[in-house]
Image (tube, rainbow, N blue to C red):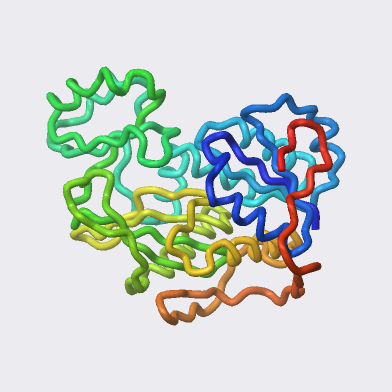
Amino acid sequence: MKLAFLVEEHYRHDGMPLDVVRQLDAWGHHVDIVRPGSSLIELSDLIRAGSHDAWVLKTVSGGPGLSMLEAAAALGLTTINDARAIRSVRDKAVAAVIARAHGLPMPVTYFAAVPELLSSIPADRYPLVVKPVGGSSGRSVHLVSTPAELARLGGELVDEGPLLAQAYVRNSGQDLKVYSISGELHATVRRSPLHPEHPVRESRVPLPSGTAALVHRIGAAFGLDLFGVDIIEGPDGPMVVDINDFPSFRCVPDGVARVARAVLDLASGAGAGIGAAVGTSVAANGVTRTPLRARPVITPARAGTTPIVDAAPPAYVG
């Protein structure tokens, strides 16, 4: 197969997705890396040629890579994840509306174009979690206890663009992060960015009861195949606080090979639509799998590891 990975500068030296690229290359597949943040790209040559079996995006929220992925999708090319699905979770305001419309448990959410508008939230709705609509990696997420505290915070939020304020849900101080790799689920716990004082070591855990069904509903609602969900356990049950496309997959055993295989399946069309898959989930050793449609076996074309092949203009780097 021939694949194109859109990798932005923030992930230039990151194991995810570069280790996945190396794994695919070692299996004999041609992988081009495109760096949209640091290269002048001739779009007609790069995208309209349609010479790649799939385009894969690893980018920060609001980065330029998503525009290129959407351009590929507009021409009918395969993208991983689906470009429309990525856009729907990158904009946290859109994600909140979609989640609530599908009956997914997400806190009550307010949207404000500028920080001053948040002052209209009634005092009895506090504490609040305030964060940028286009934020990522826990950037500029604040737990605000009172209107006065929000007013003092205003200067830090002024350059963050549109904001969300969500009702704070009391919890233990740790987040449950569930990764979905084409329907296969892996759960980890980690320290909440809102409670840095709580010593929580990131580690794998068994999936709590009911979590698998919730995560599969999220995949179906948003049309995602490779994604992560941040969940907290509140007084009334689990609450979804964030959804990420193509996350780090930290602590997933053999994560690189699992993600690489999923990319190949999705590129071939065999794994398409896993987010909407319906079937019986089987839990074992903390891993839950959703039955997939019959799919061809993609065998490594050659053994050993060779350098990533560059066969393109300077927009590509190997």
Q: Residue at x 74, y 40 (%)?
A: 72
Q: Residue at x 42, y 69 (%)?
A: 212
Residue 219 rendering spot, x and y as whole percentages: 52, 59
Asked if residue 151 lies left or right of residue 10, the reply is left
Q: Residue at x 79, y 43 (%)?
A: 310
Displayed quadrant of residue 71:
top right
Residue 180 rendering spot, x and y as whole percentages: 50, 62
> Is residue 73 positioned above or below 275 on the image?
above
> Is residue 44 positioned above or below 74 on the image?
above
- Res 25 visible: yes
Q: Nearer the viewer, residue 71 or 5?
A: 5
- Tell me the quarter of the image containing the C terminus: top right
Residue 55 rendering spot, x and y as whole percentages: 71, 47
- Res 164 visible: no
Q: Nearer the viewer, residue 19 or 50?
A: 19
Q: Nearer the viewer, residue 196 or 181?
A: 196
Asked if residue 16 lies left or right of residue 105, the reply is right
- Tell me the quarter of the image containing the N terminus: bottom right
Displayed quadrant of residue 183:
bottom right
Q: Residue at x 78, y 48 (%)?
A: 309
